[in-house]
């Protein structure tokens, strides 16, 4: 039944019908995962979404501060309201498999791992009780392995996600972090290939022994690396609107997910920072279909790839 509704939703360009279909969002930063309208309704304000691509990640973060965070409660409650929005959006869009990214700094900001877990579990049960949530621990800079051990011992996180855009971590340090996480039974992910080259994707996956890549679209420039990713069953969690609004591809019509899919790479469709990019998961599928980039059957295969996850449910 879901497949029929899925195809009808695409043909009719119907967000409402697409919301009836179970979906996964495997690349979603928790504090940025809600809808702009959620904050508008909460604060009784009007927020104009971005109308053109950002020139850089700092410009994107400035937009978030100037248009979203300024309307949320002060202090840690600002963050909690935005995470609440992410859970509420997952429920509205029938996201049944949800991998939310939380930073180590966010864990500490809530007083440590125990109060953090209690707060996140409360938000999940209140706003998205039917979603299967698989939390990722995002690591931006070096953290002592003993400190990570204190977090892992609660067995709440399912994966780590390394984001090293500022080059604050050496490859040696990232290997240590990944080896330690693997020892603790976590899935290994990293942000790579949103910028840079196909070789960057290959190097990170091979040296860190990654299970999944967040973005990875630069791999589409190398047939050899695409075939290597396909052979090694590496999944790329791709965010089309994020890629367009950060200038990493020109349009939906030219998005490299087409090339990756055609070369056998396992891909999923996700939102990244919905509260910035203003495109729900249902709308992401419609964008790719309406641009004539992919067929309904192909998009349904991608949808099922996300739902057929291999995580151990912890939350």
Image (cartoon, helix red, strand yellow):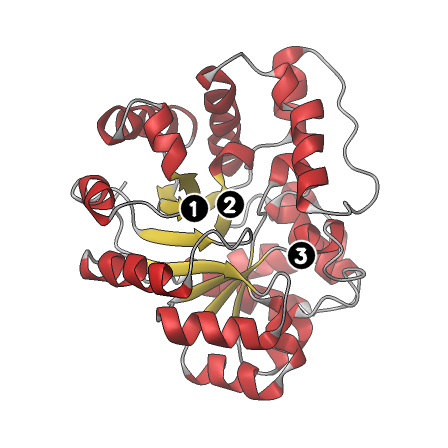
Which secondary structure lies at badge 1? strand
Which secondary structure lies at badge 3? helix
- Whether tag 3 and tag 1 are in contact, CB under 8 A, the answer is no
Q: Which of pointers 1 and 2 indicates the residue nearer the eye?
A: 2
Q: Nearer the viewer, residue 170 or 82?
A: 170
Q: Residues within 10 Å of mark 2 (few under 14, many from 20)?
A: many
Tell me: residue 46, above or below residue 270.
above
Q: Which of pointers 3 and 1 indicates the residue nearer the eye?
A: 3
Q: Residues within 10 Å of mark 3 (few under 14, many from 20)?
A: many
- Whether tag 1 and tag 2 are in contact, CB under 8 A, the answer is yes
Q: Residue 307 shows which numbered tag?
A: none
Among the two numbered marks 1 and 2 on one chain, the one whose residue lies closer to the N terminus: 2
Q: Residues within 10 Å of mark 1 (few under 14, many from 20)?
A: many
Q: Which residue is mark 2?
A: 28
Residue 79 horizontal/vertical position (percent): 49, 24
Q: Which residue is mark 3?
A: 240
Tell me: residue 13, above or below residue 156.
below
């Amino acid at each position: 039944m879901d497949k029929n509704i899925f195809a009808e939703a695409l043909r009719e360009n119907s967000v409402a019908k697409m919301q009836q279909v179970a979906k996964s969002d495997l690349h979603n930063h928790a504090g940025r995962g809600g809808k702009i309208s959620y904050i508008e309704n909460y604060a009784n304000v009007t927020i104009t979404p971005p109308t053109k691509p950002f020139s850089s990640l700092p410009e994107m973060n400035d937009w978030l501060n100037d248009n979203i965070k300024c309307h949320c409660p002060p202090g840690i409650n600002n963050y909690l309201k935005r995470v609440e929005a992410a859970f509420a959006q997952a429920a509205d869009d029938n996201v049944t498999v949800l991998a939310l990214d939380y930073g180590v700094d966010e864990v500490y900001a809530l007083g440590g791992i125990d109060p953090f877990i209690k707060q996140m579990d409360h938000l999940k049960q209140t706003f998205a009780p039917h979603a299967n949530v698989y939390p990722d621990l995002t690591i931006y800079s070096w953290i002592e392995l003993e400190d990570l051990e204190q977090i892992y011992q609660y067995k709440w996180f399912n994966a780590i996600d390394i984001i090293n855009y500022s080059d604050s971590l050496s490859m040696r340090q990232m290997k240590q972090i990944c080896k330690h996480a693997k020892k603790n039974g976590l899935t290994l992910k990293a942000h790579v290939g949103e910028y840079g080259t196909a070789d960057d994707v290959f190097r990170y996956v091979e040296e860190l022994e990654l299970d999944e890549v967040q973005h990875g679209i630069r791999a589409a420039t190398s047939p050899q690396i695409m075939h290597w990713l396909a052979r090694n069953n590496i999944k790329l969690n791709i965010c089309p609107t994020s890629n367009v609004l950060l200038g990493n591809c020109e349009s939906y019509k030219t998005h490299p997910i087409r090339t990756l899919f055609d070369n056998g790479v396992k891909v999923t469709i996700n939102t990244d920072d919905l509260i910035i990019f203003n495109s729900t998961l249902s709308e992401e599928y419609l964008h790719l279909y309406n641009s004539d980039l992919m067929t309904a059957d192909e998009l349904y295969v991608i949808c099922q790839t996300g739902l057929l996850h291999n995580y151990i449910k912890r939350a």
